[in-house]
Each structure stands twice: as C-alpha cells, then as structure tokens.
Amino acid sequence: MIEAESLNKYYGNFQALKDVNFKVEKGEIVGFLGPNGAGKTTTMRILTGFIPPGSGTVRVAGFDIQTQSIEVRRRIGYLPESVPLYQEMTVTTFLRFLATIRGMKGPRREDRIKEVIRACRLDEYSKTPIAKLSKGYRQLVGVAQAIIHEPEVLILDEPTIGIDPRQVVHIRRLIQELGRDHTIILSSHILPEVSLVCQRIIVMNHGRIVAVDRPENLSAGLGGVRHYEIEAAGSKEKILSRLKAVKGVIKIEVEDAGPTKRYLVESQPGLDIRDELSSAVKDGGFRLLGLKTREMSLEDIFLKLTSKEKE
Ligand SMILES: Nc1ncnc2c1ncn2[C@@H]1O[C@H](COP(=O)(O)OP(=O)(O)O)[C@@H](O)[C@H]1O
Ligand SMILES: [Mg+2]
C-alpha cells in the first residue's frame, strides 16, 4: 500500500533523512518509533505530499507522490504534529468545511460528518466551538478531520502526545478500531505506546531506519534487558566475582562511589535477579548498601540499536 524508496531529505546542509526505505502492506498498523529529531515528522510530511523528498520515491496504492499527488492525497488522511484547527468554528462546522474542501457535498457529506462524529465519540461536543475543547478532544477532532474523506491510509503524527492518560486510552482505542479498515502509520517516541497498537515497528534514529520488528521482539530484545545498580562495601575483586557467578548476569561495570563501590549489572531479559544479587553480596560477608533496578531509557535503546547496526 505504501512504498518508500531511498528517501533523502536535507534542510539546508543538515541531512534529516538518510536513505529511508520501507513498505507498509494494506491493512497494517505500523509505528514509527524514535527520539525527537529522528526524522519521523519529516518522513510523514513526505508521505502525505506536504513536502517533497530531496531524492527518492513514495508510492501510495501504486500512485507516485510527486507525479500523481492528487490521487495520493485523496487516499491519505493526515493528523499533523499540530493540527491547524479553526478555534471559532464548532466541531461540525469545521468538519463540514474540510469535507467541502476535499470535494464532498450534499447528503453524503452530512451523513459522513455524523458518522465521523460518532466514531470519534464527539457527539456531546458537535456544537461546541473548538476553542472550548480540552487538548484530548481537540486531538479527536484532528483524527475526525483526517478520516472525513474516507481515506484508505491514515498517517498520524504523535497522536497521543501531551494528552491526559484517560483520553490517551480513548484515542488508542479509536486507532485500533480504525485499524480494522485502514492502513495506518503512527509515530511516537514511546515504545510501550507503539507496542500497544502497532503490528510492526520501524525504529528511526538520526534520520535512519535502525530496526524493523514486531513490538514483542523489540521489547524483549532491548527494553527487556535489565540493569541493576548495587552499592556495596568490601573487597572489589571478591564482590565482583560473587556477582559474576549469579545466573543471568551478562556484564558488570564498577564505579567509585566514595569509600564504597557501585556495581552496574546487566542481566538477561525477562529475569529479575535482585534476590540472587543481594544474597551474593551478603552471603560473602559484605555490606549491601543499596540495590535498585534501572530501566533502560529510550535513548539507551536507540543507541544500542544504532551501534548494533554498525557491528
Ligand atoms: N523545517 C526545518 N528546517 C530545518 N530543520 C528541520 C526542519 N524540520 C525538521 N528539522 C530537523 O530535522 C530533524 C528531524 O526532525 P523531525 O522530522 O521533526 O523529527 P521527529 O519528528 O522524529 O522529532 C531534526 O533535527 C529537526 O531539527
Ligand atoms: Mg515529530
């Protein structure tokens, strides 16, 4: 349904996209995951025909984004990073305005507006001026405008960013429902977020695709690696050898922490070895001053993916 080939994009001298290639099959929900500045928004703007690529091609349903952009736009619904909403319009007026721009008219347009308002659970607010809506409801209006012209493909740029958690659940459910009869690409900088709704994740960093995988594989392989921070007093060599003997330990680094030492332990995914680590120190007759787990940050995950690529 979507084929992007060798996309490159420069802003001045800065290369925001570096040879980006991917395909999205009809009916798939795919997530673009990456930290700020990774190139997610740039890629989405190119896919929607908002900006041209520097080089490379995009085809949507077989149509070329540059030479057949009208055909492409007809098939795409786009929720940009910040939706240009007309504050003084009511939800219904705004949707009617956009439906008209996109070539809909008459009873079909009016039926579609009602249908979309219902689908996006905006019934209560259909006559409310957009300025009076909460951030979450505005985002729902953003999704509503993206689907009003019945596109086959939805491109949603960080659809849940800055929204309170209860409304996030709402939007997530809506995306899942839309996924039944749309091809969807959505972006996020949060792994659990894309894992919940996407069947496949394309990880981007510094303008490149660094991994493509199913969410469960990504979480298990990367987010699942556990880090522990142990502070203990006593012989460094002896403590180290006791910790190394604990099953599941992959790697240990030692840091000075004043008169004591801090041991940074990495263990295999899916294990919780806090008990074993604590016993290893105490049973050796050493004092355990602290033990905590450290989650791998997204930056760590991206670094790991990027360096893995280079190996
Ligand atoms: N219009 C622009 N002019 C110059 N640089 C830009 C512009 N838009 C984005 N960039 C830069 O390109 C990189 C990728 O940005 P973007 O695609 O917005 O990433 P993401 O959506 O993943 O956060 C960033 O370093 C950003 O600063
Ligand atoms: Mg962005």
Image: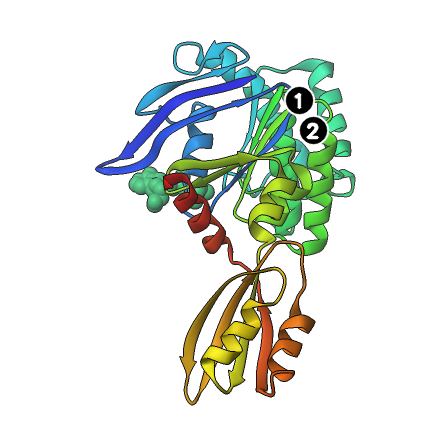
Q: Nearer the viewer, residue 196 or 91?
A: 196
The residue depicted at 55 percent of the width and 12 percent of the height is 61
Q: Specify the label residue 179 is tagged with.
A: 2
Question: For disc 2, does the CB lie below 8 Å from ligand 2?
Answer: no
Who's the residue at 78% across and 38% down the image?
123
Within-10-Å neighbours for mark 2: few <14, some 14–19, many 20+:
many
Residue flagged by tag 1: what amino acid is it? Gly
Which amino acid, by three-letter code, is at mark 2?
Answer: Gly
Return the residue at label 1.
27
- Give SS at disc 2: loop
Residue 286 in sight in this render? yes
Residue 11 place in picture, x, y as percent = 28, 36
Q: Is residue 64 left or right of residue 167?
A: left
Residue at left offset 70%, top offset 29%: 178
Callout 1: CB less than 8 Å from ligand 1: no
Per the model, the C-alpha gap separating discs 1 and 2 is 7 Å
Q: Quadrant of ligand 1?
A: top left
